[in-house]
Image (cartoon, rainbow, N blue to C red):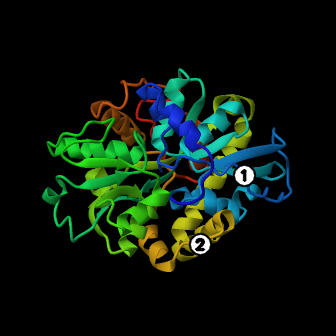
Amino acid sequence: MSVLRTSARRRTAVAAALPLTALLLASCGYGSKADKGASAAPASSAGGKKLSADQVRIGYFPNLTHATALVGVERGIFQKDLGGTQVKTTTFNAGPSEIEALNAGSVDIGFIGPSPAINGYTQSGGKSLRIVGGSASGGVKLVVNPKKVASVAALKGRKIATPQLGNTQDVAFLNWLGGKGWKVDPQSGKGDVSVVREDNSVTVDAFRTGQIDGAWVPEPTASQLLDEGGKTLIDESDLWPDKKFVITNIVVSQSFLRAHPDVVQAVLKGSVDTNKWINANPDRAKASANAALKSLSGKALKPSVLDSAWPSIRITDDPLASTLQAEADHAVKAGLLKKPDLKGIYDLDPLNKVLASEGRPAVSDAGLGAP
């Protein structure tokens, strides 16, 4: 999804020379190759009792699928639940940048897509992070030029964009194409359908000028394409049981989790409280998210794009762990990832304590929990 660039293209060129598993580490759920690198203004302290840390540094993307972070920070909900422990935020445009920050200790907790979470965990031998909560499901579509692609069969021979080689949407599209019996080389993107890997920031212009015939992309890029006359051919939610699949997780540095479990639980309380408010106040939440986007990027989404994108994203506390394993399996099947061992990637005890305090049922780690 949307917003902002820097010189990380140089890093992307280096990543292209690495083994494919490393390339996957450099992918993110939204495909951007650059990170903003600038810290958002720290939220002011709400007062109250300070927890075991003076501050907690939270990373997220200026994207609608990170609505929990956008709204929770913008409305001060996280700060309220953290009391005297100060919230500091940094926004990123790329999964690898956020994973690097988490590993370097400059970010403690992050909102991030499934592909970088999987790769950050596996590349570190299971030592870098834990997934401690869910945030969002859905919000991904295959949007096409209806004048060129009138049906699924008409995709053959067409150029369809995904955000980045090996990213969450790229894996989903390759898996879907394979299920249709079409052949595509996973690295070059050449085959029965040409898969064009390009940053979401250029996808809309490429679609407008006819350089691509469609794109398998997250919101709000999908709705920006619809605003340009595109048509939804596939809503990825329709391909999953109960129309649910993880698009954004909450991850934490394992060292921070060990040192400050009370702070992690408070952030998760803030996430649960934010999600409850979003789901109870969709119109106000939509406006809050757009205000946060404008503050972070300097530009709000058009009302037509926002109104189209917002309903397709499901805000959830459940990390939908079984779908994370499925997404990893899809990457293996597509030839983009060696079979990973995800045992231990989740620690949902802090989240389930928050949910239990509200009389709500526990969420499952699908057998992938920490010992």
Residue that mark 1 sits on: 38
Report which quarter residue 216 is drawn in: bottom left
Q: Is residue 179 left or right of residue 303?
A: left
Q: Is residue 312 visible?
A: no
Asked if residue 238 is positioned above or below residue 148 in the image, the reply reads above
Question: As rendered, which of 360 and 68 lies closer to the eye?
Answer: 68
Query: Callout 2, which amino acid?
Result: Ala
Identity of the residue drawn at 36% across and 24% down: 339
Question: As rendered, which of 131 and 211 lies closer to the eye?
Answer: 211
Label 1, secondary structure: give it.
loop
Q: Is residue 94 left or right of residue 186?
A: right
Q: Is residue 281 left or right of residue 367?
A: right
Question: As rendered, which of 323 and 102 lies closer to the eye?
Answer: 102
Find residue 334 and report its horizontal and vertical position in percent: 29, 34
Query: Callout 1, which amino acid?
Result: Ala
Report which quarter residue 276 is drawn in: bottom right
Identity of the residue drawn at 23% across and 40% down: 184
Find residue 185 and report its horizontal and vertical position in percent: 26, 36
Find residue 190 and report its horizontal and vertical position in percent: 26, 42
Residue 248, label in figure: none
Mark 1 Cα shell of 10 Å, populated few (<14), some (14-19), many (≥20): few
Q: CA distance from mark 2 to mark 1?
A: 18 Å
Residue 300, label in figure: 2
Question: As rendered, which of 351 and 201 lies closer to the eye?
Answer: 201
Q: Is residue 25 left or right of residue 207?
A: right
| N-terminal-most mark, 2 or 1 | 1
Label 2, secondary structure: give it.
loop
In the displayed image of the protein, which residue is found farthest to the top? 125
